[in-house]
Image: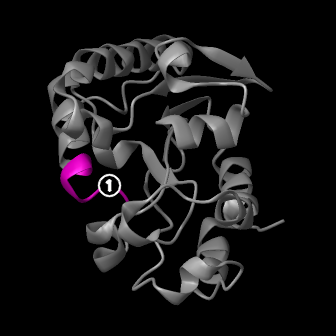
Amino acid sequence: MFETLEEINQVVKNCKKCKLCNTRKNTVFGTGNPNNGIMFIGEGPGADEDSIGEPFVGKAGKLMNQAFLGLGIKREEVYITNIVKCRPPNNRNPEKEEAFACMDYLRNQVILIKPKIIVLLGNVALKNILGEEYGITKARGKWIEKKGILYMPTFHPAALLRNENLKIDFWNDLKEVKAKADIFLNSNDIYK
């Protein structure tokens, strides 16, 4: 068990648990406010994230930022991370062994952050966090409660770049998150 997020991040920077360490430029740990009660989990870093060392800074991240802006959510007031902390080559989905290698890091992030709401961005995040029996098409937009945490599965922003028809569902799911945060967390900190 780690005591701080920075302690986990230092271990992640030197991690060699899987083959992704051989091709990474930077590890991509997480960013944002760890004290606000809302966490977003994606699948893994892309090329832009690998170059900069920060999650969701590429095209998918810009799209997510636009949704945040439109809904009045401050990106810096939510915590954003991924299942794996190193970029899978060619932006492929993380393999099971790679996700498994990073899972203790993610579990410790969740333990330290103590989120009330976790937004699962895409099928990879959904299956790795809640189980293989879930699929994003059926689960998205539905609140799932486990161990005192409310989960909102939704499409990964990269999926919206490939299929614009998914944007409305993504937008509605984030509206649900904003509404639940206002009620459940009784906090206006994520708003402008």
Q: How many marks?
A: 1
Q: Is residue 185 visible?
A: yes
Which residue sits at x=37%, y=74%? 53
Q: Quadrant of residue 159?
A: top left
User: Up-down: is 180 above or below 46?
Assistant: above
Q: Quadrant of the N terminus?
A: bottom right
Query: To which quarter of the image does residue 73 belong?
Result: top left
Residue 54 visible in the current orientation: no
Picture residue at 67% right of the left edge, 81% below the top:
11
In terms of depth relative to the viewer, which is nearer, 190 or 156?
156
Instruction: Work out which quarter of the rendered image holds the C terminus and state it.
Output: top left
In this picture, is 106 found above or below 120? below
Judge the density around disc 1: few (<14), some (14-19), many (≥20) Cα neighbours within 10 Å.
many
81 sits left or right of 165 in the view: right
Residue 122 place in picture, x, y as percent: 46, 36
- Looking at the picture, how far across and down is residue 172, in whole percent? 31, 13
Q: Which residues make up the magenta segment?
A: 54-61
